[in-house]
Image (cartoon, grey):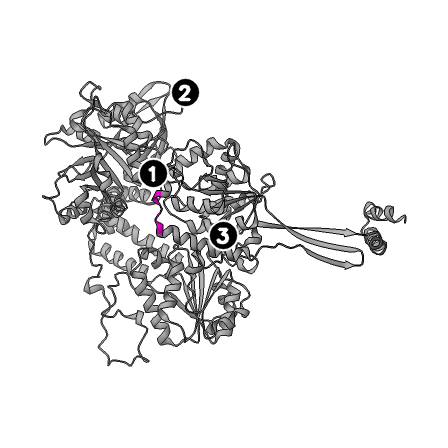
Amino acid sequence: MFPFLALLDSEHVDEELLVAVSHVAPVIASRATPESTIRYLLVEDSTSTDVNQIITLLDDGADKAIVPLSLAKSLLGTVPAHRLLLLLDVANVSAVSDSVRNAVSGVLLKTSASSGFGPDVDLIHSVSRFFVGATVHVLAPDLPTPSTIRKLAAIGASVVIPFSQLTLGSTSQNQISVADAFLASIVSDRSDGLFPTVIASDPHGKRSLGLVYSSRESVAESIRTGKGVYHSRKHGLWRKGETSGATQDLVRIRVDCDTDALEFSVVQHGAGFCHLDRASCFGDLDGLAALERTLASRLVDAPEGSYTRRLFNDEELLRAKIMEEADELCSAKTKEEVAFEAADLIYFTMTRCVAAGVSVKDIERSLDKKAMKISRRPGNAKPQWMPKAEPPKAELSKAEAPKASSAPSSKTPLRRNGPIQMRTVDISAVSPEDRAKLLKRPVLKSDEMIAKVKPIVDNVRARGDSALRELTAKFDKAQLDTPLLLPPFYPLALEAQQLDPAVRDAIDVAYNNVYKFHAAQIDGAPLVVETMPGVTCTRFARPIARVGLYVPGGTAVLPSTALMLGVPAQVAGCEQIVMATPPRADGSISPEVLYVAHKVGAHAILRAGGAQAVAALAYGTETVPKVDKIFGPGNQWVTAAKMLVQNDTDALVSIDMPAGPSEVLVIADDTCNPAFVAADLLSQAEHGIDSQVVLVASSLPDTVLAEVEEEVDKQARALGRVDIVRESVAKSLIVKTQGPEIAMEFSNDYAPEHLILHLRDAPGWVDKVKNAGSVFVGPYSPESCGDYASGTNHTLPTNGYARQFSGVNTQSFQKHITSQEVTMDGLQTLGPIVATLADCEGLQAHANAVRIRLGM
């Protein structure tokens, strides 16, 4: 979030002011501005501007387009949300539909005049709740004050200031200085009021040059002069390079996420930033920056006849080397080979660039400009680089035809990036070593993640609610008075009014099914066994008293996970159920999750996510009760935090199971429906790029397998998450086996989270399943049913842990206690046996506890 935005409200703007403002804020304009400024395109008249004109301006480099509601509707699905802002009068917010709200990244609100600048901050705050997760900018006709800028920043909004109200001089009744506007919402956490400032070299890929301090005076001077000006704690104002010549041209000043530190992007001149005449205080340049510097030096002083001089002087030699290295890169196979050949190609490419006076920064600008384009090229290669077409062949019968994925049909969408397909192996042709590799998942670097989450966990453990509030503000952008919500949850602050009746009814049906299945699992009656006359052993179940249920959330809505964890906790009779879920930006929880919390009888909702939520559940805070066991899925930060706290004896907390990326294994034979199989594979592939998808083809004819692959490609391209699917499917696997017995053997060794059986007499094969989280039997049992509403639980072991872990169930929320009752007659028989064994182990007191009763 920028402290403010600047609006070009005149045809004639002072060039010095324009450049100075562009160093600290985006410039909003309805016309072209110099390339050095950050440009937001303002379209106020929808009748004089069409969609194609907006796309052209965005293609030309405008960061975002600010458009009225009528134009926004026309741009839906054409312009990405992060490139669109909605221009809206504050009185017309109710006219914005959900589809428009979700298709923009923010809103520019125009407010009416008031007595002195003072848009109703409470009103702006209520509007920002409607645009959850979006940026909110406010344009009012009167001059803003630093106080108002701070108030708006406190609710996550920023002010738009016309250039006519900005000055490089001092703030007056009619104008506010650029420095005052920029610094209004920035607060130092130091007693001397200085701001820690990171200096980054703009032409060298944001390399850090050093760490200094800035004062309000030095920032104002830097903005005014366009030079690097800082604050020396010994000498005061410090104009970098004033005596040494190592001056800096200012490119941009940015504020960090906590608004207490600054980053200066600069072009460094002279010997470098460091007083030791080095480029950086953190060591010399490396990577592309070092290569660029070396080549620039060799361009000047490379000896005649040297290889480098020949490359600079002989364009044909350099061209030949670039072509040679490009060809070798294309032929590289292993990761090491690709890296080696790419480095060679980059060396000769940079030689070409330096010879032509092109810098790394020039390349970055070109990349940034290409990335800004909305319209896309077809993506076809030039004819001279395409392989020669084979002569046409006679049409083959369907049985003889190659796999459909090898060539697009007329009905298949254009495959700009090749077919979306899995790699195939025949299990009969691989060695035992290679078969073992097929069973492995990507290596999870748990040690690295635990090291990353430990400071967060320690912070919450030491500082409790204060740390929770700070971390929630940092990661979830939500300002909370208290992290804990208490019942009643439905309705809570009128959230229930937002609950779609169809969704509520679906949750009710899912709840009933999940409850019914989990209630049947309850371990109620004690197990009583008389092991010998007079000796009775009993086992009985008791609920785990305090449980924490982690429900991923934030911008997502996951009532299904709340159901899958809350229902078995409710059935088991846990005394205290604490649900943890990340809040939305306004601090609220989705009404769907609130409704589930109400139905399962949750006792509290912790409005926090990530490692900080896990830490609060494990150790407790001033308001958050400590729990005995933590359940629920999450990202790698959540998983690492769960693993960390379960191994801390001070926490005395357990977890449900280790977690990993989602996975499915489908066994299919010639009776399968290819479309069904493809849909089942994609239902897991869309979770993330690290999702694991395996198709085990049991004597599946090549023609049927080709239909499956064609369906995977076709269905994937129709998904909104096609980019994720493309990556996960490319790393996934088709394993060809001879018969269902070998297929089942591979599945049991793989131990999948989800196992789907598309087999002849599928129910008959369930008895052969040894390792799986959950099994889906037959063509009409999609994995989605288990995820949501069939009744089984969707919190399941991944990463091969189905060999030793069960999925979450009612007994996950119970513990079992044993008891024994021995009568006098029973002790007469059992006692001597116990005493003999105790003597054998040398435990005299154990034996004495028996002998004293028997008078032995």
x 34%, y 72%: residue: 706
| Residue 339 is inside the magenta segment | no
Q: Main secondary structure of the magenta part?
A: helix
Q: Position of residue 550 (x, y in %)?
A: 48, 45
x 30%, y 36%: residue: 128
Quadrant of image for the N terminus: top left
Check disc 3 and report the residue beneath it.
Answer: 659
- Could one spot residue 253 in this view of the protein? no
Q: Residue furthest right?
A: 856
- Could one spot residue 483 in this view of the protein? yes
In the figure, is residue 835 to the left or right of 370? Answer: right
Q: Nearer the viewer, mark 1 or mark 3?
A: 3
Give the Cα separation between the discs numbered 1 and 3: 36 Å
Sequence-first tag of 2 and 3: 2
Q: Which residues are magenta?
A: 497-501
Give the Cα separation between the discs numbered 2 and 1: 29 Å
The tag on residue 217 is: none
In the figure, is residue 835 to the left or right of 89? Answer: right
Check disc 1 and report the residue beneath it.
Answer: 207
Q: Amino acid at mark 2?
A: Ser
Check disc 2 and report the residue beneath it.
Answer: 191
Q: Secondary structure at mark 3?
A: loop
